[in-house]
Image (cartoon, rainbow, N blue to C red):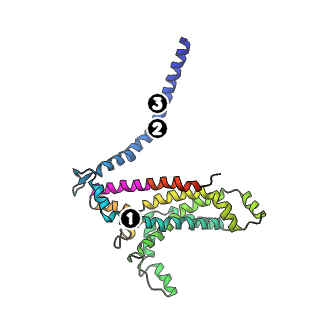
Amino acid sequence: MPLIAQAGSASGRRKWKEGLLGYLFLAPSLAVFILFLFYPMLRSIYLSMTLTDPRGRIAAFVGLDNYVDLFSSGQFFTNLKVTLLFILFTVPTTIIWCLLLAALSHNKLRGMKAFQFIFSLPIVISVSTGSIIWLLLFHPTAGMLNYFIGFVGLGPVSWLADPSSALLSISMMTVWMNMGFVYIVLLSGLQGVPEELYESAKIDGSGPVRTFVQIVLPLLSPTIFFVLIVSVIGAFQAFGQIHILTKGGPINTTNVVVYSIYQDAFVNFRFGIGSAQALVLFAIILLLTVFQFKVLEKKVHYQ
């Protein structure tokens, strides 16, 4: 019996040392998460219940008053509507467009590598650089877009100054900017479809369109689902192109929730209401992501 007890004690000490060693390896990552994720989140929760002075210092604790003011103000819901419209304009368009490009450039014809490189090129361009490029394209007098539409007899368009076209213009630029990542992911998914399936479908007399819709798309559904989740979250967080191109204008037609947070917190130094908006936006993204996993994932076909 003493030998059994000693063996059990030695085994317990060994497991304790292995566990301690594991936590030591995890310590750097845990420190980064605590410093840059958990602490800012807790700080935001606290700030959302306070008022700050013009210098950004905490002046008073007001509890849930910031949330009451936020939901009683129509501006937040207007900004949320603009954000949802921006998502509607960009996410489905990007996925469908990149899926079409991936399907066309997936074959092994000569020269397809060049097209694949061109279609994936926007991934290496930063948001600021891409925004400057499109700012020049959108210029009402010297821009190339108005130059080209002049050939078909149309007058110049105030792409970013007209409230009816500003959000669509930014959405068009965002589709181009996100095209590289989405195209690469979808092309990788297509390359994972076994060639035997194409050959079997061809032997059975299935045409290219029918093969793609009935065979390839179900096998590609996990990739499309991943792209959908990432694209929706990214669209909720869009900021750079809006800040450079329109600054939320004209007449707040491009003032998405993230840009409103920036204006309240870092321009007007209202960190309380800005933190409240950030937490509400986090809750909306979380609920929408959970909804997508609970509802849309049922239609995903895993091999």
Q: Gap in Å between the C-alphas at discs 3 and 1?
A: 46 Å
Q: Amino acid at mark 3?
A: Leu
Residue 60 vs residue 6, the one in the foreground? 60
As drawn, the label of residue 20 is: 3
Q: Gap in Å between the C-alphas at discs 2 and 3?
A: 10 Å
Q: Amino acid at mark 1?
A: Val
As drawn, the label of residue 26 is: 2
Of badges 1 and 2, nearer the viewer stands 1
Relative to 69, does residue 13 appear above or below in the rendering? above
Residue 257 occupies quadrant = bottom left
Q: Which residues are magenta?
A: 270-285
Q: Residues within 10 Å of mark 3 (few under 14, many from 20)?
A: few
Q: Position of residue 145 (x, y in %)?
A: 48, 79
Q: Amino acid at mark 2?
A: Leu
Dot 1 and dot 2 residues touching (CB under 8 Å): no
Q: Residues within 10 Å of mark 2 (few under 14, many from 20)?
A: few
Q: Is residue 184 left or right of residue 140?
A: right
Task: Write down the residue under mark 1.
Answer: 256
Q: Quick one: SS at disc 1?
A: loop
| Disc with the residue nearer the chain's start (3 vs 1) | 3
